[in-house]
Image (spheres, rainbow, N blue to C red):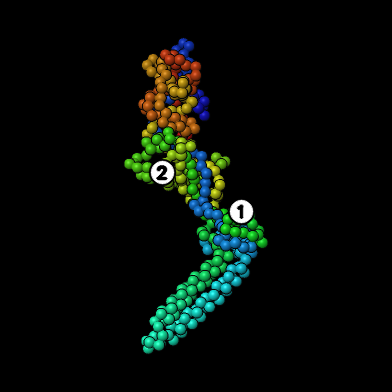
Amino acid sequence: MATALYSCANSSATPGMHQQGAPALPVLAVATTSGATFREYPASLEGKVNVEIRPQVEGYLEKIYPDEGAFVRAGQPLFKIDARVYNEALNNAKSTLLAAQANVSKAQVEVDRLTPLVQNNVISEVQLKTAKANYDAAVAAVEQAKAAVANAQINIGYTIVKAPANGYIGRIPYKTGSLVGKNDALTVLSDISEMYAYFSLSEQDFITFKNQFAGNSIEEKVKKVPPVELALADNSIYPVKGRISTVEGQFDRTTGAISFRATFPNPGGILRTGNTGKVRIPQLYNNAVVVPIEATFEVQDKVFVFAVGDSNKVASKPITVSGKTTNYYFVKDGLQAGEKIVFTGVGNLQDGAAIVPQPMSTDSLLKAKPL
């Protein structure tokens, strides 16, 4: 397309204008425009809830309710552990409670029998105090037995393992009949209605980030960050934008990086825990000078263009690049809007060389090669 634009410009040149030996080259008047570039950072994805499901009692796995990958809701039964041992423990606790309550009644009878005898000085008060102490001990035994009953009931409740939140069931390593205990992970439950994308910035990138957005604190700066994109493993862009939500409090001494977290809505459940991708943080430019990358060249890591001056002679000018798209540089310093630069053929030019300018339309170029 650039060749076509150049050809059109070249065909409009007046015969006889060419200086002897001077090449005819397309020339572009630098323009300003608004756009955005993206900084990309590798990210790992996790659901907002990602919890291991473990039993709180030991026993044989009697039933598995959901299949792997199934969606479950909070409170829904997931696994059933054989409860017979715990039912018997509850029966035993209830029997102990009945016996303790009978002992309270017995102790109360003894206190009631001895009280009038002490009042009539038939027996010593020590015997009554002993009876009352026995009564208090019996009452305490009842409370202890009640706690044992409650504990046994709790253990029976634990034989039904329920979902702590809405989410998807992961792999289930144990099958019906397996003996499981408190240290065994029955599965992993992931709530993926929202996804957390974790990524890291180097110290230099973090300084750039701080300088890019307004605010007196990191929290204020994070709020000013526009919505971010997520590039998936196949380089496609996830259709729903997210926002940076948190920044870790310190740099990792091993990697020299600081962790960020971006949150992405996941209404269709397309994203899953364990996915990878790249978080794309936009950098917005308003009325910025743009230069086609093919109009530039590099010398010792510096970017230059050939500016067209008086008498159609060219001179190399260094430019400071603040951002980059596929086809263009956003220029921070070095060029002003309206300055003319050589568009193609810069590889064969030298400072002071004369050319025959072939004007190009910046608008047409931007239409042919969008930002």
66 on left or right of 335: right
Q: Residue at x 43, y 35 (%)?
A: 203
Q: Is residue 115 visible?
A: no
Q: Residues within 10 Å of mark 1 (few under 14, many from 20)?
A: few
**Vertical relation: 157 (above or below) 97:** above
Q: Secondary structure at mark 2?
A: loop
- In this rendered view, identify the residue nearer to me: 208 or 59: 59
Discs 1/2, front: 2
Sequence order check, earlier mark of 1 and 2:
1
Amino acid at pointer 1: Arg
Q: Secondary structure at mark 1?
A: loop
Residue 283 position, x and y percent, is 42, 37
Amino acid at pointer 2: Gly
- In this rendered view, identify the residue nearer to me: 93 or 297: 93
Instruction: Write down the quadrant of residue 115 in the picture.
Output: bottom left
Instruction: Write down the quadrant of residue 156 in the picture.
Output: bottom right
**Vertical relation: 297 (above or below) 91:** above
Q: Residue at x 49, y 45 (%)?
A: 197
Residue 52 position, x and y percent, is 55, 54
Residue 321 position, x and y percent, is 42, 28
Q: Residue at x 44, y 86 (%)?
A: 113
The residue identified by callout 1 is: 171
Q: CA distance from mark 1 to mark 2?
A: 34 Å
Q: Residue at x 46, y 39 (%)?
A: 252
Q: Is the Cβ of the residue at disc 1 closer than 8 Å to that at disc 2? A: no
Q: Which mark is residue 285?
A: none
Residue 118 position, x and y percent, is 39, 85
The residue identified by callout 2 is: 249
- In this rendered view, identify the residue nearer to me: 102 or 161: 102
